[in-house]
Amino acid sequence: MAATEQPVIVDVDHVSMRFNLAQEKTESLKEYLLKLVRGQLMFNEFYALKDVSFQVRRGEAVALIGRNGSGKSTMLKVAAGVMYPSAGSCRVNGTIAPMIELGAGFDMDLTARENIYLNGAVLGHDRAYMDEHFKAIVDFAELWDFIDVPVKNFSSGMVTRLGFAIATEVTADLLVVDEVLAVGDFMFQHKCLLRLNKMLESGTTLLFVSHSAEQVKMLCKRAIWLDHGVIRGDGPADEICAAYEQAMQSGQV
């Protein structure tokens, strides 16, 4: 008997994301608003994503690869609900734990302790749930000595450790990760990879962006190659990474 196909967690349906870039420079906000009201501002249209469609099923680990400016981070933000597409739709069937930007969701004036509960509330968890997971979060982040220090005094690596610990400790159907593993020392990166693998084994779905082909192939069986906002390849991670690297070396991207 054939294995039952897993349900779709992420359904990206003909998504385009358009930005209007001003052609001329304005010296002040007042000048900008006056020109906007008078219809005197000229814009260039820029498409970060162009008619992108794909699905990710429960338990899949899918990497988005491509050069800077290819639309990877924009696609993650659309999937996380941070941005709404100009055209098409992106539906996520389940809860999301986003790790997109360092410090996103943190109040920098609050302590690490306070931010753990704040982030938990944003992710939909009550205080009792966060009480239960508090020790494990701080243990993983290795921040007991700084737990009552305002996050604004943290290094970028400490912020990353705290954000990753929160996002991966609480239960979510989809984990969205953008270049987080590029920050921090080798031991922390290794610990993060072990945790992500454990989550994947338990059925969590991963949408992952990284410029490291090694990390992509270590975590993901599938990769989607974005080039100037368009899908150029979608398939086994080894094959897609090899095709992308060959194109890079031959100057085709």
Image (cartoon, rainbow, N blue to C red):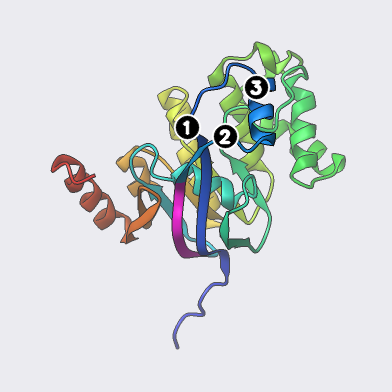
Question: Residue sitting at 56 percent across and 59 percent down?
Answer: 87
Q: Name the amino acid, label 1.
A: Gln
Q: Which residue is mark 3?
A: 31
| Residue 111, above or below 92 | above
| Residue 149, above or below 242 | above
Q: Name the amino acid, label 2.
A: Leu
**Nearest the camera: 38 or 168?**
38
The disc placed on residue 41 is 2
Check if residue 55 falls in the magenta segment.
Answer: yes
Question: Residue sitting at 65 percent across and 51 percent down?
Answer: 96
Where residue 239 sits in the image (x, y, percent)? 24, 57
Q: Name the amino acid, label 3.
A: Glu
Marks 1,2: beta carbons within 8 A: yes
Question: Residue sitting at 67 percent across and 35 percent down?
Answer: 38
Tell me where the magenta segment starts and ends, as one range: 47-56
Q: Earlier in the sequence, mark 1 or mark 3?
A: 1
Where residue 113 sits in the image (x, y, percent)? 77, 24
**Mark count:** 3
CA distance for labels 1 and 3: 14 Å
- The quarter of the displayed image where residue 223 is located: bottom left
Q: Which residue is mark 1?
A: 23
Mark 2 falls on what kind of element?
loop
CA distance for labels 2 and 3: 10 Å
